Amino acid sequence: MIPESHPRYESLLTRELIVEGIRNGITSMQGLIAQGRGEAFDYLIGEKTSTCALQAERVTAAMLLLAKRPVISVNGNVAALVPGEIIRLSDIVNAPLEVNLFYRTEERINRIIECLRSLGAKKMYTKSDGLIPGLEHERAKVDTDGIFNADVVLVPLEDGDRCKALVEMGKSVIAIDLNPLSRTAQCAGITIVDNITRAIPNISKFAEELKDSEKDELLRIIREFDNKKNLNNSIKEIITYLSNHGNLMPP
Amino acid sequence: MIPESHPRYESLLTRELIVEGIRNGITSMQGLIAQGRGEAFDYLIGEKTSTCALQAERVTAAMLLLAKRPVISVNGNVAALVPGEIIRLSDIVNAPLEVNLFYRTEERINRIIECLRSLGAKKMYTKSDGLIPGLEHERAKVDTDGIFNADVVLVPLEDGDRCKALVEMGKSVIAIDLNPLSRTAQCAGITIVDNITRAIPNISKFAEELKDSEKDELLRIIREFDNKKNLNNSIKEIITYLSNHGNLMPP
């Protein structure tokens, strides 16, 4: 339906992928809007991984490798866009997956679990017997063995409220969020300002490189990272992008 | 389903409006993603009408009042978000509406026409007997009495390709687009960088103020406007917003 001649052909094809996720009952319609927000911010960083995102991705790999009870949270967009990549990361760093939806329905949760299992996911937390304090009931549900009890949680594309609630539980929260100003980006312990389609494979690559490193070396990588500074650099990259493009249009 | 306590409650409610548009067969799923892109850029201008947007809105009112054969193009998102407001503008400036979809199906075209008629739209162009040169067949379809023959076309939320094709036909194209860097924003004769929910009522307000003005006065308003300069100012506003928010986070 989209002509190949269209200049935004590739971006439109990615949209098709997530629209397909809706047809399969994996993505929510609100998730589509969230995808659009991400597209806009990705556009403003030039649709490539910045140096600061790459640093945050390396630190994330170190954090996941050092964690005692790491969990990777999966929502509808993650399952539609990077199902294979998230399973691969889960295997490499030994962090089980837990499905966690903003617009939660048991049906959609089960579809995503089935989809991930069919693609080879082995370790998953699938109960909903715990509640994150401070959140409205449906949004608070988690697995007591999984996110509830985790020390490090990777939340790609998380809501600001839930990110904050997880931080307040004392967890190390790693967020992937293309908007460096978002509440999620600002309250997470580590913020990766990058598209998940690039971020997840990057974290996996770093995790493989760091897998046999000494604990002290991993700790050093984490200690040297300053999330606030990194976030500010992400904002500066957008400003540079806008300034350069503004100059293309002489007054 | 969304708790009132959620800090982004209003923005989430607007999303519901457009999700409702999908359930009614008015909005496309790709339109939801486009809405998300818009949300992101709106966020970056502080979710309010800037001084430069207000200027472009006033010039738009003057252009529509001066036009001989003005047409207002309506797509699925416009119909879902501002159906009443677009009909009101159509009445004030005497510019008929024409439904024009990126993902065109006759069924959706007819649903939108029915929806607009049920809300009181009188003047509409509903044929599809003309083709805009240079576009793939389905996307080229227009009414020969409407957009094909128009001198001024208001395209809220238009695709870059189609905007360019309309400009190449020699029409004065007025675009409403929250992304000042987009191809649509950059190729239109007048670009309003604002949310359509604010832009359409603003244009109507200016049209009412200017309705009885002399032709010379309207021409003067148009002549004094510099779209490139205005667009550059819109980009600068985003940079200012980002810089201010970047400063909220000391390194």
Image (cartoon, coloured by chain):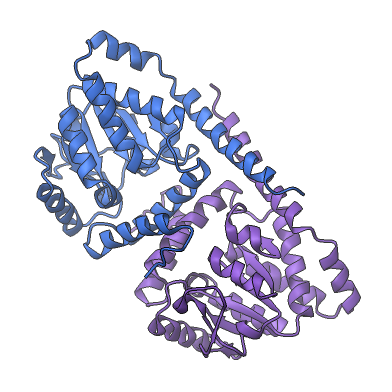
Chain colours: A blue, B purple
Image point (67%, 82%), residue name: B150
Spot occupied by residue B198 in the image (x, y as percentages of width and height): 62, 63
The answer to which of A220 and A51 lies nearer the viewer is: A51
Q: Looking at the picture, does residue B160 appear above or below residue A38?
A: below
Instruction: Kindly identify the residue that appears in the image at 63 percent across and 66 percent down.
Output: B175
Residue B168 appears in the picture as rendered: yes
Left-right relation of B235 to A104: right
Residue B137 placement (x, y as % from top left)? 46, 78
Query: Which quadrant: the N terminus of chain B?
Result: bottom left
Residue B94, quarter of the rendered image: bottom right
* x and y percentages locating residue A183 in the rendered image: 45, 39
Q: Nearer the viewer, residue B99 or A142?
A: B99
Question: Closest to the observer: B183 or A169?
Answer: B183
Q: Nearer the viewer, residue B237 or B140?
A: B140
Question: In the rendered view, would you say B68 is above or below A176?
Answer: below
Percent position (x, y) of residue A166?
30, 34
**A18 relative position to B123: left or right:** left
* Residue B193 in view: no
Q: Residue at x 49, y 58 (%)?
A: A7
> In the rendered view, does B57 fall on the left or right side of A22?
right
Q: Which residue lies at the image location 61% right of the left edge and 86% below the top edge?
A: B146
How many numbered callouts?
0
Quick check: A88 left or right of A238?
A: left
Q: Is residue B152 above or below residue B36?
A: below
